[in-house]
């Protein structure tokens, strides 16, 4: 016995052009979204936040020293320490880049001032 009523091996399917287009094209257009737009921009830690982070890291290091090696809490402590140090390193890197940009800006301004200053041939004027 074959799979279809009329004895053919394949079923006959009819689609209207509108139905096939509707199946291919979505009805609601989803906008292209960049995931970077939803992330918070990295912000520099102010002195108070950095001091709090350093204090937290010091407490976590002390707690890690006192935690037995076989303790199930040890992995969580190590992860918290790693995240804290990564945040501190990222902040230090931002500070370094900010300082380099400030230095480049100051050097550029100094070169512009030197270029704009009148040039003299020596310490004494040539004509009196």
Image: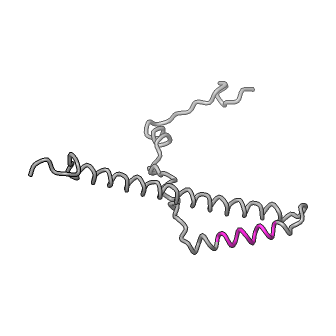
Residue 24 place in picture, x, y as percent:
49, 40
Residue 9, quarter of picture: top right
Q: Is residue 76 left or right of residue 30?
A: right
Where residue 64 appears, as percent x and y from the top left, is 81, 66
Q: Is residue 125 magenta?
A: no
Q: Would you say residue 59 sits in the magenta stretch? A: yes
Q: Nearer the viewer, residue 127 or 4?
A: 127
Residue that sits furthest to the top in the current view: 8
Q: Residue furthest left?
A: 128
Percent x, y of residue 99: 47, 58
- Compared across the picture, whether 100 is left or right of 118 comes to right
Residue drawn at the location 21% of the way across and 45% of the way down: 121
The N terminus lies in which quarter of the figure?
A: top right
Seen in the picture, residue 36 relative to 46 is either above or below; the reply is above
Tell me the chief SS of the magenta region: helix
- Please say if 76 is above or below 124: below
For the record, the magenta segment spans 53-64
Task: State the residue at coordinates (89%, 61%).
Answer: 69
Q: Residue at point 58% right, 30% down?
A: 12
**Image point 56% across, 33% down: which residue?**
13
Q: Nearer the viewer, residue 64 or 111?
A: 111
Camera-nearest residue between 37 and 119: 119
């Amino acid at each position: 016995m074959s799979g279809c009523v009329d004895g053919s091996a394949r079923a006959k399917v009819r689609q209207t052009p509108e139905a096939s287009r509707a199946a291919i094209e979505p009805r609601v257009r989803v906008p292209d979204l960049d995931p970077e737009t939803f992330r918070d921009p990295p912000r520099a830690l102010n002195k108070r936040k950095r001091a709090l982070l350093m204090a937290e890291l010091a407490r976590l290091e002390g707690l890690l020293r006192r935690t037995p090696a076989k303790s199930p809490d040890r992995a969580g402590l190590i992860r918290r320490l790693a995240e804290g140090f990564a945040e501190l390193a990222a902040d230090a890197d931002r500070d370094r880049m900010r300082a380099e940009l400030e230095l480049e800006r100051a050097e550029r301004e100094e070169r512009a001032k030197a270029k704009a200053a009148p040039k003299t041939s020596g310490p004494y004027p040539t004509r009196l």
